Image: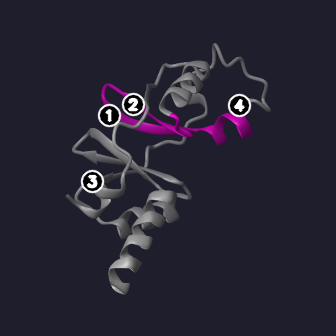
């Protein structure tokens, strides 16, 4: 198991590209998550966060029951292969200015790593050095 997969969130919430923002909100609640991976034909194409909805969609007064996820998701999805390193994930987050990176094996979504996951990894590394 790679360090990346050790600290990732498996079974992340996934929504279709044509799902409405209302459906996306329900999925976030079900998964107790602040983000969803948006997929099209099984491939990750974007990420939708609570922040996208609260800071962009709601102020624009869009109809959450009619507006599709594609209108407010970040695209393309920031992806990294499961065998890559935490440093690679951190670099991608810095380059893209995002807080979530989708972990894939080929085009298959296997999880996601967040800033919190990176912090847990750094903490674990620190404990290894102390011990």
Q: Name the N-terminal-most of marks 4 and 1.
A: 1
Q: Name the N-terminal-most of marks 2 and 3.
A: 2
Q: Name the residue under label 3.
A: 81
The stretch of residues the image draws in magenta is 32-56
Label 4 sits on a secondary structure element that is helix
Q: Quadrant of the N terminus?
A: bottom left
* Labels 1 & 2 near each other (Cβ < 8 A): yes
Q: Mark 4 points at which residue?
A: 57
The local crowd at label 2, few if under 14, some if 14 to 19, many if 20 or more residues have their Cα within 10 Å, is: many
Q: Name the residue under label 1.
A: 43
Disc 3 from disc 1: Cα separation: 13 Å
Q: Residue 39 carries which label?
A: 2
Label 2 sits on a secondary structure element that is strand
Disc 2 from disc 3: Cα separation: 16 Å
Relative vertical location of residue 85 with respect to residue 36 in this rendering, above or below:
below
Disc 4 from disc 1: Cα separation: 24 Å
Q: Name the N-terminal-most of marks 4 and 2.
A: 2
Question: Residue at coordinates 56% horizontally, 28% vertically from top-left?
Answer: 29
Question: Residue at coordinates 38% horizontally, 78% vertically from top-left?
Answer: 127
Label 3 sits on a secondary structure element that is strand
Viewer-proximal residue, 8 or 61?
8
Q: Residue furthest top?
A: 66
x and y percent of residue 65 in the render?
A: 64, 14
């Amino acid at each position: 198991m790679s360090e990346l997969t050790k600290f990732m969130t498996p079974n992340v919430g996934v929504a279709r590209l044509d799902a409405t923002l209302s459906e996306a909100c329900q999925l976030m609640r079900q998964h107790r998550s602040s983000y969803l991976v948006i997929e099209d034909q099984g491939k990750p194409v974007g990420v939708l966060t609570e922040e996208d909805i609260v800071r962009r969609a709601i102020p624009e007064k869009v109809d959450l029951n009619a507006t599709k996820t594609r209108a407010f998701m970040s695209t393309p999805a920031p992806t990294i292969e499961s065998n890559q390193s935490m440093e690679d994930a951190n670099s991608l987050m810095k380059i893209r200015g995002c807080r979530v990176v989708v972990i894939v094996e080929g085009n298959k979504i296997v999880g996601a790593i967040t800033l919190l996951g990176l912090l847990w990894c750094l903490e674990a590394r620190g404990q290894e050095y102390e011990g």
